[in-house]
């Protein structure tokens, strides 16, 4: 036996580890929520909110409440049916409620009997949130009785008990994310959760979402109210009009429709507008109110439907040039929204970023194609103008194709570039720049505002990983950092080579608020630690988007902050009584024309170059003084919160002198 064990390296049955209950979730949270960064932590909110939305979409709830409190606690409640609290047939010693929150792959969404369509499909959402929360309280109002049960880190903390009587019905869930999983100091962003709530309300026009946030959390968060009732009677059409605001449309009205699928398979809603602004296109897709940023089969159906309908319309009016149109030509100047409700959809992964249901392509193509053909024939003059515009785009693409294949575009196709990157056209790095933009929405505006020849856009999803307190394995596994490294092409650490940098300038462009400053700080930390040579070469910059727009008497100017605004009021608008002051909520809500004029136009905009202290820039002096900046970054961004607190205490008196 000893010889056998020695032969097999001591590997026996005793080495086989069995994880029970929800331990697999705590052991490998990335498998269930995509990671352990702040973006993944916000996914917990999505999981619970999706369950409430499923009740609304099924017709059992009309109101959802979301509140964010000071202890990093989120409360989400609905007035739906309430989770069942009776004993479960397979687990007679447990209520159905307890089974749902403590057992993976449990729920009422597998058979299709309880929910015709739903966002929660795998039966893991509620239990995963429980597993990754330090505290969770669930209250259920059913049949005149209010029930309550508490959980922590996947385990039951109290028995299900009756805590009162009530005339209400529904489910209320509050939880606090476990900082053992997400890291000390991780906090929910009111801006992110409020934006999530608005997107859900857009996607289902029958729901009302009541929002509340503790006032102290809004101190440095622009554009997020303390209380709000979120409801959009026209659904995604309201969303489209908000995205098209300030742009010149190619048609008087956007293309909009809502269609029921045959045989009760679901339904879809779509809204598309075309504009004259140069753009790389903007398309947001959803399935059962779940965002699908990587698209999928429903997006394939939409692209195919519009392409076939336009070619069919071209044949009808005897325009033979429509044959050269591709879906990219059609969507290149389009702002498109697609929401599909599908029975038993299939996604790629638990985070559901891509729809893979095979039947979605056919269902969407059939539903949209006939509607688009009808829309085109209903206004021949506008349709001809749109078609001619798109054909011009296609002809320009065709003329430049051979040149592009021989230039930089051909070379970059050999590289593994991130899908979100909207690259520039120039074949060399001279004069080119890449904007690292906060969020997909702002990325869409930046793509419309850019100079395609010289400016590339890479949207980043929320706050990137803080590399100063992360392990090397965690850094390598982070998708946002991986995408950034691939786009720049110059490598990291010992493999860094400034000569391989694909752009002359790297520009960080975030919102002009505290959240934006935090994201910029995280990115600068990343570059300092992993690509310090880029800073030494003077290639890293900060964009300077404005915070205000001041208008009076047909004259408009922009202010970068409050001090600049006050200065302009005393100089440019001195003596004027009626001055309209608009505060930008974020880059994503700034019209592309204004973003270009204020922040991206190379002839008008201003940039801040990120530099090292003089003694640290090169040579032996750098090695001697390296501890200065390195120690400061470790103190402010590292793992020791006491060091940060001490720095704040030491330097708080200087805050009033800070001027960006």
Image: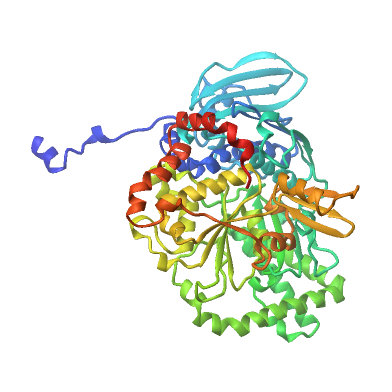
Q: Give whichever of 91, 500 is nearer the camera.
A: 500
Q: Position of residue 540 (x, y in %)?
A: 51, 58
The quarter holding residue 138 reads top right
Q: Give whichever of 235, 257 is nearer the camera.
A: 235
- Residue at the left extreme, as displayed: 3
Left or right of 621? Residue 389 is right
Q: Position of residue 159 (x, y in %)?
A: 55, 16
Left or right of 481? Residue 453 is right
Q: Going 55% across and 66% down the picture, which residue do you hit?
A: 433
| Above or below, 478 relative to 488 | above
Q: Going 84% across and 52% down the picture, which residue do you hit?
A: 573
Colouring scheme, one of rainbow, by chain, secondary structure, one colour: rainbow
The quarter holding residue 218 reads top right
| Above or below, 387 relative to 606 | below
Q: Going 67% across and 54% down the picture, which residue do you hit?
A: 545
Q: Give whichever of 234, 278 is nearer the camera.
A: 278
| Above or below, 618 relative to 218 | below
Q: Give whichever of 394, 352 is nearer the camera.
A: 394
> Does the rendering let one see residue 214?
no
Give the quarter of the figure containing the N terminus.
top left
Q: Position of residue 580 (x, y in %)?
A: 85, 49
Numbered disc total: 0
The quarter holding residue 230 reads top right
Q: Going 47% across and 43% down the picture, which residue do you hit?
A: 466
> Does the rendering let one see residue 637?
yes
Q: Position of residue 72 (x, y in %)?
A: 59, 29
């Amino acid at each position: 036996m000893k010889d056998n064990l020695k032969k097999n390296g001591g590997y026996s049955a005793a080495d086989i580890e069995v994880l029970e209950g929800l331990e697999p979730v705590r052991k490998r949270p990335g498998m269930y929520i995509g990671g352990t960064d702040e973006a993944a932590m916000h996914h917990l909110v999505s999981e619970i909110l999706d369950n409430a939305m499923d009740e609304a979409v099924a017709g059992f709830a009309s109101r959802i409440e979301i509140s964010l409190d000071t202890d990093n606690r989120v409360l989400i409640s609905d007035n739906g049916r309430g989770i069942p609290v009776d004993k479960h047939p397979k687990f007679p010693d447990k209520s159905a409620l307890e089974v749902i929150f403590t057992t993976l792959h449990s729920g009422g969404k597998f058979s299709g009997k309880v929910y015709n369509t739903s966002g929660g499909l795998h039966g893991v959402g509620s239990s995963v949130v429980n597993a990754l929360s330090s505290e969770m309280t669930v209250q259920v109002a059913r049949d005149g009785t209010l029930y309550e049960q508490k959980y922590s880190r996947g385990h039951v903390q109290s028995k299900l008990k009756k805590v009162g009587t009530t005339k209400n019905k529904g489910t209320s869930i509050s939880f606090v994310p476990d900082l053992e999983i997400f890291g000390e100091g991780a906090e929910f962003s009111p801006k992110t959760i409020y934006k999530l709530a608005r997107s859900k309300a857009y996607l289902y026009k029958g729901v009302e979402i009541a929002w509340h946030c503790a006032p102290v959390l809004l101190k440095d968060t622009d554009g997020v109210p303390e209380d709000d009732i979120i409801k959009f009677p026209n659904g995604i059409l309201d969303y489209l009009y908000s995205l098209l605001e300030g742009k010149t449309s190619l048609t008087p009205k956007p293309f909009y429709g809502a269609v029921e699928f045959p045989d009760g398979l679901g339904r879809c809603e779509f809204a598309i507008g075309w504009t004259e602004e140069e753009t790389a296109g903007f398309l947001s897709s959803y399935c059962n109110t779940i965002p699908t940023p990587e698209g999928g089969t429903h997006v394939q159906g939409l692209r195919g439907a519009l392409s076939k309908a336009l070619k069919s319309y071209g044949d009808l009016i005897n325009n033979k040039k429509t044959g050269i149109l591709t879906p990219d030509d059609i969507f290149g100047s389009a702002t498109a929204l697609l929401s599909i409700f599908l029975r038993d959809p299939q996604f790629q992964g638990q985070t559901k970023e891509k729809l893979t249901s095979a039947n979605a392509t056919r269902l969407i193509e059939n539903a949209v194609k006939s509607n688009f053909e009808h829309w085109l024939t209903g206004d021949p003059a506008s349709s001809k103008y749109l078609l001619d515009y798109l054909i011009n785009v296609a002809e320009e693409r065709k003329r430049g194709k051979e040149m592009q294949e021989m230039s930089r575009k051909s070379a970059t196709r050999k590289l593994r570039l991130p899908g979100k990157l909207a690259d520039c056209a120039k074949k060399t790095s001279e004069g080119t720049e890449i904007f690292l933009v906060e969020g997909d929405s702002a990325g869409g505006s930046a793509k419309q505002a850019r100079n395609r020849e010289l400016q590339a856009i890479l949207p980043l999803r929320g706050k990137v990983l803080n590399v100063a307190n992360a392990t090397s394995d965690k850094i390598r596994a982070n998708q946002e950092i991986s995408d950034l490294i691939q786009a720049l092409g110059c490598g990291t650490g010992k493999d860094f080579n400034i000569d391989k940098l694909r752009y002359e300038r790297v520009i960080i462009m975030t919102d002009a608020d505290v959240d934006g400053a935090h994201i910029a700080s995280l990115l600068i930390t990343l570059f300092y630690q992993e690509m310090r040579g880029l800073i030494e070469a003077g290639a890293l910059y900060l964009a300077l988007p404005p915070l205000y727009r001041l208008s009076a008497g047909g004259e408009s100017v922009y202010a970068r902050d409050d001090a600049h605004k006050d200065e302009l009021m005393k100089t440019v608008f001195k003596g004027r009584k009626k001055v309209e002051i608009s505060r930008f909520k974020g880059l994503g809500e700034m019209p592309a024309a204004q973003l270009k004029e204020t922040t991206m136009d190379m002839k008008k905009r201003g940039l801040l170059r990120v530099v090292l202290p003089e003694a640290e820039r090169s040579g032996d002096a750098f090695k001697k003084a390296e501890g200065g900046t390195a120690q400061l970054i470790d103190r402010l961004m590292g793992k020791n919160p006491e060091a940060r607190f001490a720095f704040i205490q030491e330097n708080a008196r200087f805050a009033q002198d800070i001027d960006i």
